[in-house]
Image: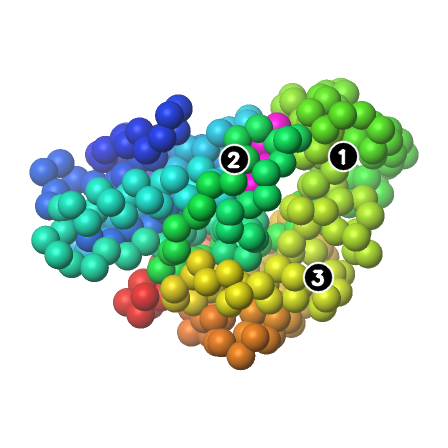
Amino acid sequence: MATSYSGTLHNYAPRLTAFEFGLPNMAPKPHSILFIGGLTDGLYTVPYVQTIAKALEPTEWSLFHLLLSSSYGGWGIGSLGQDVEEIGQCVEYVRKMKQATSSGVATKVVIMGHSTGSQDVLHYVHAPNPLPLNPDVDGVQGLIRPVVDGAIMQAPVSDRQAMLPSVQGSSEGREAYEKLVEFARSQPARSICPIELTGLVGLPPETPVNARRFWSLASPESPEKPAEDDLFSTDLADQRLDQTFGRVAQRGLLRGTLVALYSGSDEYAPEGVDKEGLLARWKAATNAGGKKLWDDEASGVIPGASHNVRDEGQAWLIERIFSYLNRV
């Protein structure tokens, strides 16, 4: 496998960059996919990204891999609100840049998230625009997010449910979880949780996590009172889905349709989950307002695929993505 890739590094906002894959001397392309990774992800940590970029070479689409403030180890003090504002800045930058080089062709921008990046995608298209100002979260300034032409969620699994095996599987994990919940409940939002405990509950170890983000990811009052990050848990009520998937049409931030690509052998999904049934519930909530925004043709369960589609399922994934892009 190649260890280096041609492309252009864009500084789309202060201290924020995005890498656009592309061959040397490649003619400007009018359309763009903006890829957002999950917890701990950065450049080249999701194996299929480079495969998609390679497959896009003969098309009018280019792929950008975004580096947000929450990339790599920054997730522990970040938030979905901060992420989507930074994504919005990139959407605006890319659209203006492509319009300047596309000779009048209507440019299109699709956002695609992997894992927790899927939470960013759904938050982008369902949350209020602009977001309410939040003094507890750095970077959330109430910026207006631009409309996108498409949205793809790959491996949209629940961080809360992914923690459960670590919490329920040992007394040490359960004790650490209870201490962290009490800390997050009682301490200021930006306080850093005891770092020796977070790795015991299934979160990536050795990463500073503040009280607010732990509470959002763990969502200890779910399913009755889910926190911001708890978007994809299988036990959420229809009412919660109406507040998230069901708000997409109302916000008007998605010009096209919403795609969900669930990995068939996702190691972070709850054991025995009915993946097709879960997608059906999300579809019903998305389309409940009367506008059909769920993409039936592209959405589905990737046969045999791991969480980040390391090997099996990549061809299936790319086929669905290409089918979608041809209709955006």
Secondary structure category for the residue under label 2: loop
Nearer to me, 208 or 256: 256
Q: Position of residue 118 (x, y in %)?
A: 53, 50
Q: CA distance from mark 3 to mark 1?
A: 25 Å
Q: Which residue is mark 2?
A: 141
- The residue at the point 32 percent across, 33 percent down is 12
- Looking at the rendering, the stretch of residues picked out in magenta corresponds to 76-81
Residue indicated by mark 1: 201
Residue type at mark 3 is Arg
> What element does badge 1 sit on?
helix
Q: Is residue 101 visible?
A: yes
Three-letter amino acid code at disc 2? Gln
Q: Do the residues bearing badges 3 and 1 touch, measured as CB atoms within 8 Å?
A: no
* Distance (Cα) linking label 2 and label 3: 26 Å
Q: Residues within 10 Å of mark 3 (few under 14, many from 20)?
A: some
User: In the image, is residue 122 above or below residue 5?
Assistant: below
Instruction: Find the distance from the CA under tag 2 to the CA under tag 1.
Output: 31 Å
Residue 55's mark?
A: none
- Residues packed near mark 2 inside 10 Å, few (<14), some (14 to 19) or many (20 plus): some
Q: Main secondary structure of the magenta part?
A: helix
290 and 65: which is toward the camera: 290
Kind of residue at disc 1 = Val
Asked if the stretch drawn in magenta spans residue 80, the answer is yes
Q: Position of residue 47 (x, y in %)?
A: 42, 42
Q: Decide: marks 2, 1 in contact (CB < 8 A)?
A: no
> Residue at the spot x=69%, y=41% of the render?
217
- Disc 3 secondary structure class: helix
Q: Which residue is mark 3?
A: 240
- Whichever of callouts 2 and 3 sits on the residue coming sooner in the sequence is 2
* Quadrant placement of the N terminus: top left
